Image (spheres, grey):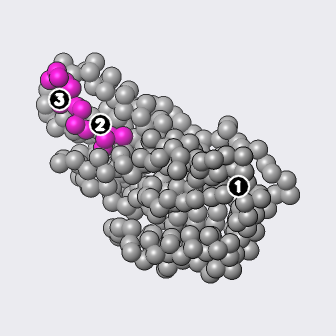
């Protein structure tokens, strides 16, 4: 392995997380890490060591993310009001949807020099909230409030003065508070708890029993369900149960099995579907839960068959 590879490869995983926070897209984060290493390789001969290699790479990665000028990532509730469509609507592949991030890679990013990836800074709610910030403000907030860099270090990373960094942070924080769920306006580190795992087991038991009332009892009154890339979404227990109930009978789509896991450091059920004419259950979606005060506040269902990315089996 060359000196360049030894210097930069150790930071691949945490740079991927950084680019993901900036862009809200796992696929684009992968591409931007490659772009970062390409730019770093071209400039490696001129690197004078005035900063650490890590800080230098973060600066390159941040500028690469800003340079791509991608539209902000969204979920269905950014597009239209909640509704229960009379007919099924087709998926919107033209929309830049927020993408989930595999926990198997988040764990690998926690390397010696990396800041541990706190759950509250990788959850979907946080990622959607920071998408409301202009890219440079987003970068400033990530460096200062997520990575814990000083104003001077941040200024060097984003090509701003210290005064401009402080001003950008003052503007960014109120926007973040406005778009975070109310209980998250003050961040506090927390791991997936036994209570959350027990709640998912109760959810699975209610599903297996085909019991809509038991499912409803686990939900907040204003629960929100989204299913990107489909543009419609549901709000409130009544419509949530109405949307889920057809799937409780095999006559609708087939038989379901669920495997508990975590994605974006959030409790998740990997949903496997066996249609009537099939003999195996195939990975169909990831149902990612946001849980507040012991009940389900939000469920985001991402259709996917990419089992390897999330460390899952393709079929069960």
Report how far apart the C-alphas of labels 1 and 3 lie in the structure: 50 Å
Q: Magenta region: which residues?
A: 1-16
| Residue 51: % across, % down | 16, 36
Q: Main secondary structure of the magenta part?
A: helix
| Residue 42: % across, % down | 28, 18
Which residue lies under the disc numbered 3? 6
Residue farthest to the front? 279
Q: In the rendered image, is residue 104 in sight?
A: yes
Which residue lies under the disc numbered 2? 12
Task: Decide whether residue 3 is among the magenta residues.
Answer: yes
For residue 56, the mark is: none
Badge 2 or badge 3: first in the primary sequence: 3
Q: Where 305 falls versus 103 (above or below)?
A: above
| Residue 68: % across, % down | 48, 31
Relative side of 142 to 230, left or right: left
Relative side of 161 to 65, left or right: left
Q: Quadrant of residue 309?
A: top left
Quarter of the figure with the N terminus? top left
Q: Residue at x 40, y 41 (%)?
A: 19
Q: Quadrant of residue 4?
A: top left
Q: Residue at x 74, y 74 (%)?
A: 238
Which residue lies under the disc numbered 1? 254
């Amino acid at each position: 392995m060359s000196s360049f590879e030894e210097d930069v490869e150790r930071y691949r995983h945490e740079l991927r997380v950084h680019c993901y926070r900036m862009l809200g897209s796992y696929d684009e984060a992968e591409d931007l890490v490659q772009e970062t290493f390409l730019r770093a390789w071209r400039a490696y001969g001129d690197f004078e060591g005035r900063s650490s290699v890590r800080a230098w790479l973060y600066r390159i990665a941040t500028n690469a993310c800003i340079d791509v000028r991608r539209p902000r990532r969204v979920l269905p509730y950014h597009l239209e009001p909640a509704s229960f469509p009379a007919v099924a609507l087709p998926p919107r592949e033209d929309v830049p949807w927020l993408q989930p991030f595999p926990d198997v890679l988040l764990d690998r990013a926690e390397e010696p020099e990396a800041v541990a990836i706190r759950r509250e800074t990788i959850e979907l709610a946080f990622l959607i909230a920071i998408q409301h910030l202009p890219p440079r403000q987003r970068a400033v907030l990530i460096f200062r409030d997520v990575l814990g860099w000083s104003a001077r270090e941040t200024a060097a990373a984003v090509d701003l003065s210290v005064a401009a960094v402080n001003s950008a942070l003052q503007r960014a924080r109120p926007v973040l508070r406005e778009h975070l769920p109310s209980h998250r306006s003050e961040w506090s580190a927390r791991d997936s708890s036994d209570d959350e795992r027990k709640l998912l087991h109760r959810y699975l038991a209610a599903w297996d029993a085909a019991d809509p009332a038991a499912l409803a009892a686990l939900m907040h009154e204003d629960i929100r369900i989204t299913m990107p890339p489909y543009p419609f979404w549901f709000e409130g227990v009544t419509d949530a149960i109405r949307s889920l109930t057809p799937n409780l009978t095999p006559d609708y789509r087939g038989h379901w099995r669920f495997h508990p896991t975590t994605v974006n450091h959030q409790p998740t059920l990997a949903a496997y579907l066996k249609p009537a004419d099939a003999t195996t259950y195939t990975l169909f979606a990831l149902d990612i839960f946001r849980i507040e005060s012991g009940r389900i506040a939000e469920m985001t269902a991402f259709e996917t068959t990419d089992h390897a990315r999330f460390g899952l089996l393709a079929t069960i």
